[in-house]
Amino acid sequence: MSPLEPFGARLRRVMDERGPLCVGIDPHASLLTEWGLNADVAGLERFSRTVVEAVADRVAVMKPQSAFFERFGSRGIAVLERVVAEARAAGTLVVMDAKRGDIGSTMAGYAEAFLSKDAPLFSDALTVSPYLGYGSLSPAVALARETGAGLFVLALTSNPEGPEVQHAVRADGRTVGATVLAHLAAENAGEEPLGSFGAVVGATVGDLSSYDLDINGPLLAPGVGAQGATAADLPAVFGASVRNVVPNVSRGVLRHGPDVGALRAAADRFAGEIRDVVAGR
């Protein structure tokens, strides 16, 4: 089977067509309850497929959080397989939020689970952790290049524990986070219109002026909506790289369910606000 067009090129096109919004699919037990659903496989499926029905034809990216499906075992994974297939069929790109990170053959196994085109969970991109050393991601990088998929590598996350690792200073004077960004810039060098290897950079992390976010790749930015960041905050955080930002909104959209129309209206509102900010309006 021939590889897809590179993820970066596909992402740039759908961002330009639909705006850069990413909607998370995070079926927390509390959200299932808010929707009037049971915290079981039936509730999981109703929730997730309703979100796909509502927004997959209008947003650039959807990001299912694998953990909330895995907790139901094989039946939950079966729901995740259907969600991924239905979202991709509707024209949105799927970023699997699994944050995998290991070494050698184990990392290769994780890559094959999500980045092999014949895998049931094949996704357009996968979130990965570089904190066993960036080189540990090599199997995923190689397979992504082979299949036309992408990666989003944890770089500058917004959780309070992140800085103890990401802002740690190496012997060469660079922080660990800056080193991750430099590796990604090297992966994306010369790619047009956008590289396929992105960074996860929280929209709530504050001043990033000391970091070079110009990696010629996408910047997945969780934190817009319920976590406190707004579309208007993005230029201050990301500067000239804001055009390559993929802001993720989860609860800010999901809490409007189970009404499909309300979910669509919320996604459209966030997408419009973000599109205006990126365009400088």
Image: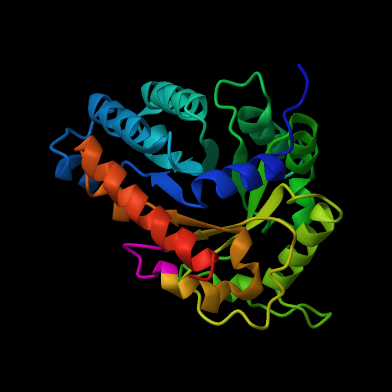
Residue 265 visible in image: yes
Figure check: 92 above or below 211: above
For the question of whether residue 98 can be seen, the reply is no
x and y, in percent, of residue 90 in the image = 47, 27
Residue 110 quadrant: top right
Q: Position of residue 28 (x, y in %)?
A: 29, 45
Viewer-proximal residue among 52 and 130: 52
Prevailing SS of the magenta stretch: loop
Left or right: 105 with respect to 261?
right
Q: Which residues are magenta?
A: 224-231
Q: Position of residue 182 (x, y in %)?
A: 78, 66
Q: Residue furthest right?
A: 190
Tell me where residue 82 sits by quadrant: top left
In the depicted structure, whether residue 242 falls above or below residue 116:
below
Q: Is residue 221 left or right of residue 37?
A: right
Going 72% across and 72% down the picture, which residue do you hit?
A: 178
